[in-house]
Image (cartoon, grey):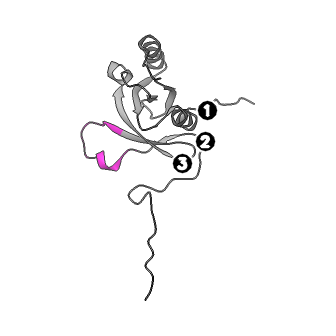
Amino acid sequence: MAALAYRFTPDLFDEPAPAPERAAREMPLRSTASLGERRFTAWRGRSGRRYVASVFPSDDPHALSFTDAVLLAVSADRRILAARDSGPFGIEAALGRWQRSVAEAGATEIHVHLLAEDGASRRAALLDLMPQAETVD
């Protein structure tokens, strides 16, 4: 009798992870493409890892009400301008200053990634998604 073998495929319904890149890029969720309002999206970090996020207008104070989240300031041309950890307490004054400064820098949306389980996971996500400083020769 032949043995049965099963192959575990974690990304069976997702696109395969691309080769590592220089910058993170947005990969909108196909399952929400038919919705009129974009409430969720996903980003691929430089490592190829996928991060699902909720989408808020840059001036929406609700975007800052989450604790232990990764916050991404996104421009109209779909680039991450800045990223930060909201922290365990969601300090309103600091987050409010950040929200105003990223809006002045051109952010039109704030994407909130809530699936990082702990501080180390949030730091890893930030390093993977944050825009890298460009060097000038």
Sequence-earlier tag: 2 or 3: 2
Bounds of the magenta segment:
28-40
Mark 2–mark 3 Cα distance, whole angstroms, equals: 10 Å
Q: Residue 131 placed where, x, y %?
A: 57, 32
Mark 1–mark 3 Cα distance, whole angstroms, equals: 16 Å
Pointers 1 and 3 in contact (C-beta within 8 Å): no
Residue drawn at (32%, 22%) of the image? 62
Quadrant of the rendering where the N terminus is positioned: bottom left
Quarter of the image for residue 60 reads top left
Residue drawn at (44%, 58%) of the image? 10
Is residue 34 covered in magenta?
yes
Pointers 2 and 1 in contact (C-beta within 8 Å): yes
Is residue 15 covered in magenta?
no
The image's mark for residue 89 is: none
Quick one: label 1, few (<14), some, or many (20+) residues within 10 Å?
A: few
Q: Residue 70 placed where, x, y %?
A: 46, 30
Q: Which residue is mark 1?
A: 132
Extreme residue toward the bottom, this view = 1
Q: Which residue is mark 2?
A: 22
Quadrant of the rendering where the C terminus is positioned: top right
Quick one: label 3, few (<14), some, or many (20+) residues within 10 Å?
A: some
